Amino acid sequence: MSSRRWNGPDHANFPGASFHYNALQVHHLHCVRHWERNLDLKRFLRGRLIQTVAKINLDEMMLGHQQRRAAHGSRIVQVVAMHETLPVEAERLRRQLEWVDKRFTLISPETLFGVWDRTRAVPKWTKPAVLFTFDDGRESNYTVAAPMLESMGTRGLFFVVPQFIGLTARDARNFYYSNIDIRGSVPSESAEQWTPMNPDQLADLVRRGHSVGNHTLSHANLSGLSTSSLRDEIEGGSEKIASWTKKPVEAFAWPYSWAAITRQSWDVIRATHRFCFSPCPGITDCSLDSPHLIWRTEIEAYYSNAEYRFMYSGLINPVWARRRRRLRATLKR
């Protein structure tokens, strides 16, 4: 087979092909521009909404509601999902954590896991609780986020991708942009964006009281895999992490969207992990919700003050209520 790259139809051999090919290009360009305009509009509307909420202090009012629930004995937890925590964003992250510390009880993974353990005393929180989790296994989580959490008296849960862990230079960059950030973005020249932790750093996190969870072996979408592939991704990922940390892996978080899971994959997760975290925003009520379906809200280190206040307030949660119901229904079938 010829290795010549195909650059469209041969206009000389296919009469009229030039017109049709150009029409396809124009249509594709139109679709891309339409998508970009819609995205820009959504960002604009989201920004205006967040600024308005901050201006009238609606976020603080909603936080007050959460605090009253916690004061009356509700064991509610906001599980935060972050990704990169770059050194350039360290001061912004610190300000966010200090803001959270004044309004929430910062808890460790061990504390959250103990809530569902009937042999342990029930924790008493006077404020709603927050657990910080971090996805993929970037080295910036080890160098920036972990020490910062420790300075505030808490610990985090780090969901890692074993095939990513320990890669260096070009291998790390290629894996990151082919398996983790698959949006088609131009690869960053900053290695901090895509450099992973190594196995020794994972083991060190565990020694310091943090927890390491499973984010699938290769950052796979679980919704379309065969039974054998599911076991490789879920069980294989867990076994690899345990070989590094010398601890059983109790927590699992599936990648991508809230719907990137099936009942079959969920069954494999439940058989091998005590806790399963969903990429679906919501507040987890430990008295009512299952440890096999814990909600997580993405709140990044680089968010502005108004953005993270909006997200912690729970104002986004009603938007996701239907998806949470659909997810529950799908996994109960």
Image (cartoon, grey):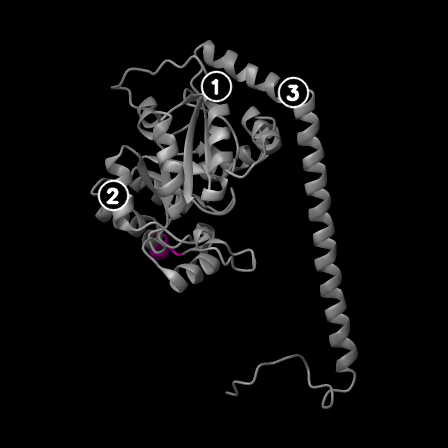
Asked if residue 228 is among those painted magenta in the image, a careful observer would answer yes
Q: CA distance from mark 3 to mark 2?
A: 42 Å
Disc 3 residue crowd, few under 14, some 14–19, many 20+, Cα 10 Å? some
The answer to whether the residues at label 3 and label 2 have Cβ atoms under 8 Å apart is: no
Which element is circle 3 on? helix
Is 159 located above or below residue 132 in the figure?
Answer: below
Q: Amino acid at mark 3?
A: Leu
* Figure quadrant of residue 124: top left
Q: Position of residue 55 (x, y in %)?
A: 69, 23
Q: CA distance from mark 2 to mark 1?
A: 31 Å
Mark seen at residue 102: 1
Magenta stretch prevailing secondary structure: helix
Q: Position of residue 191 (x, y in %)?
A: 44, 55
Mark seen at residue 147: none
Q: Nearer the viewer, mark 2 or mark 1?
A: 1
* Residue matched to label 3: 58
